[in-house]
Image: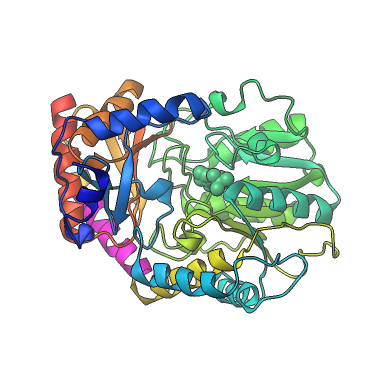
């Protein structure tokens, strides 16, 4: 069967259940994998040998006709589901009239429209200003530059377990795995790391979820401010309001409240990196809303344009004080990506944020209840459709990812020994049931 034959087999892929019809990877996938291998950068991870032909909603089909339920969503990015017809139509319409003009030098209506809609949706007063980028790491780079420019200070604080990107500035903040940093130093000077409150492998012996914010006081105020860096030298504290790559860790509200207080006291910019937790992923537009904390700077990307390369760095006008020409981007805020983002915002506002909250709570409850007596599972946590499952041992995460793939469920590891579920926000209850059924059965068998 050729890929062409497969693609004409059905019309509504999004309704399909996972169905594995060949060994994995199948013959066509093996052939294509062997052909591409010599030409690809070996830095690409490729957690499973999945060669995707097409995808719709939460369902992905490979080149051999196997269908998978997608609980990864291109790493929490295909927010409106794969190829949502309204996003596809918006992209086609825009592509007919304007592909590129460069938002740094010229105007087009979409840029301002997206910025004003994001301003209304962001927490706190709605006078946020936005700089658009091509990716999450670029949004973080922009935040680093803005924070330094605005405060006239150099140093930055981030947290152990954090992931802020892979370009040199953002990589200096990233501290989720040494493999991201090994061999790339020296990175930016003046970056300090503290403990993320409520971390599941708490260095001071408190374990999730009973942790209080003493970690923060000890790690940040005592260890850093007393011994390493004076707070009046710090330009910004970068924090993921829900830690992503580091393990899908939800901090106690007080952690972020306390960070806000510290930043206010010392004139430090509080940057919420919402690249993974934003755009409805946690059941609210911004994860910040769960905690009632308004940051000074926000970074977004991933779900912003349903998979098109678009990121955003937002700040209030009193902070967005850099002058014309001090920062820019050739393709950041490309009109086609913006068209995808505007359609994405419509869908999130109409129903998908709510669906993320409701179906996320349902899936989490099922996993919590049914995994409670499985010895290899230590706990389930998360908000909305950002769900982490903490395992007993690191090697289980890889084994589970592979075993779920063999059964038609795509999941990804995170943290030291956790699995993340971050499906498209269109996940239905029936699909959540299928995901839970496969995941629980696989956990039980591995345990
Ligand atoms: N910040 C966070 C919180 C992320 O999760 C990521 C990517 O996973 C990034 C930044 C970097 O985004 P990108 O891969 O688009 O550069």
In this rendered view, identify the residue nearer to me: 152 or 6. 6
Part of the protein shown in magenta: 352-366
Instruction: Report the side of 164 relative to 32 (left or right).
Output: right
Relative to 338, does residue 3 appear above or below in the rendering?
Answer: above
Q: Is residue 154 visible?
A: yes
Query: Measuring 65% from the left and 20% from the top, which residue is drawn there?
Result: 183
Ligand 1 visible in quadrant? top right
* Relative image position of residue 356 (x, y in whole percent): 33, 62
In the picture, the quarter occupied by the C terminus is top left
Query: Measuring 61% from the left and 21% from the top, which residue is drawn there?
Result: 182
In the picture, the quarter occupied by the N terminus is top left
Number of marks: 0
Relative to 38, does residue 211 appear above or below in the rendering?
Answer: below
Q: Quadrant of residue 348?
A: bottom left
* Relative image position of residue 432 (x, y in whole percent): 20, 53
Say whether residue 354 is magenta. yes
Protein image colouring:
rainbow
In this rendered view, identify the residue nearer to me: 6 or 364. 6
* Relative image position of residue 316 (x, y in whole percent): 70, 68
In this rendered view, identify the residue nearer to me: 330 or 269. 330
Relative to 393, does residue 216 appear above or below in the rendering?
Answer: below
Query: Measuring 40% from the left and 67% from the top, which residue is drawn there?
Result: 88
Say whether residue 170 is magenta. no
Could you tell me what secondary structure mostly forms the magenta stretch? helix
């Amino acid at each position: 069967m050729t890929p062409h034959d497969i693609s004409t087999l059905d019309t509504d892929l999004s309704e399909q259940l996972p169905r594995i019809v060949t060994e994995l990877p199948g013959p066509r996938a093996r052939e294509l994998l062997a052909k591409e291998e010599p030409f690809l950068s070996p830095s690409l991870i490729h957690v499973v040998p999945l060669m995707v032909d097409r995808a719709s909603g939460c369902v992905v089909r490979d080149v051999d006709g196997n269908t998978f339920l997608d609980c990864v969503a291109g790493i929490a990015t295909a927010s409106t589901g794969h190829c949502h017809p309204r996003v596809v139509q918006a992209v086609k319409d825009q592509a007919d009239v304007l592909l590129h003009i460069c938002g740094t030098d010229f105007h087009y209506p979409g840029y301002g429209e997206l910025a004003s809609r994001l301003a209304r949706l962001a927490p706190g007063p709605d006078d946020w200003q936005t700089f658009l980028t091509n990716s999450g790491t670029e949004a973080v780079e922009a935040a680093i530059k803005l924070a330094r420019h605005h405060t006239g200070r150099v140093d930055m604080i981030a947290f152990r377990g954090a992931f802020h990107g892979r370009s040199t500035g953002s990589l200096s903040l990233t501290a989720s795995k040494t493999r991201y940093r090994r061999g790339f130093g020296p990175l930016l000077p003046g970056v300090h790391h503290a403990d993320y409150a409520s971390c599941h492998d708490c260095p001071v012996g408190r374990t999730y979820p009973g942790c209080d914010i003493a970690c923060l006081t000890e790690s940040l105020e005592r260890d850093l401010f007393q011994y390493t860096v004076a707070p009046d030298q710090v330009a910004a504290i970068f924090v993921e309001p829900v830690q992503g790559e580091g393990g899908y860790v939800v901090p106690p509200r007080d952690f972020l409240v306390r960070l806000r207080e510290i930043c206010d006291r010392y004139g430090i910019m509080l940057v919420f990196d919402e690249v993974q937790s934003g755009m409805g992923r946690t059941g609210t537009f911004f994860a910040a809303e769960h905690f009632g904390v308004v940051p000074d700077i926000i970074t977004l990307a991933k779900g912003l344009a349903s998979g098109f390369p678009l990121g955003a760095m937002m700040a209030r006008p009193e902070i967005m004080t850099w002058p014309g020409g001090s920062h820019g981007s050739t393709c950041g805020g490309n009109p086609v990506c913006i068209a995808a983002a505007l359609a994405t915002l419509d869908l999130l506002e109409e129903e998908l944020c709510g669906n993320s909250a409701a179906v996320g709570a349902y899936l989490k409850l099922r996993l919590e209840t049914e995994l409670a007596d499985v010895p290899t599972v230590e706990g389930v946590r998360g908000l909305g459709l950002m769900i982490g499952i903490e395992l007993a041992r690191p090697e289980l995460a890889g084994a589970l990812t592979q075993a779920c793939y063999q059964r038609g469920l795509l999941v990804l590891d995170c943290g030291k020994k956790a699995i993340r579920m971050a499906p498209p926000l269109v996940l239905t209850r029936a699909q959540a049931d299928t995901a839970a059924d496969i995941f629980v059965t696989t956990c039980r068998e591995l345990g």
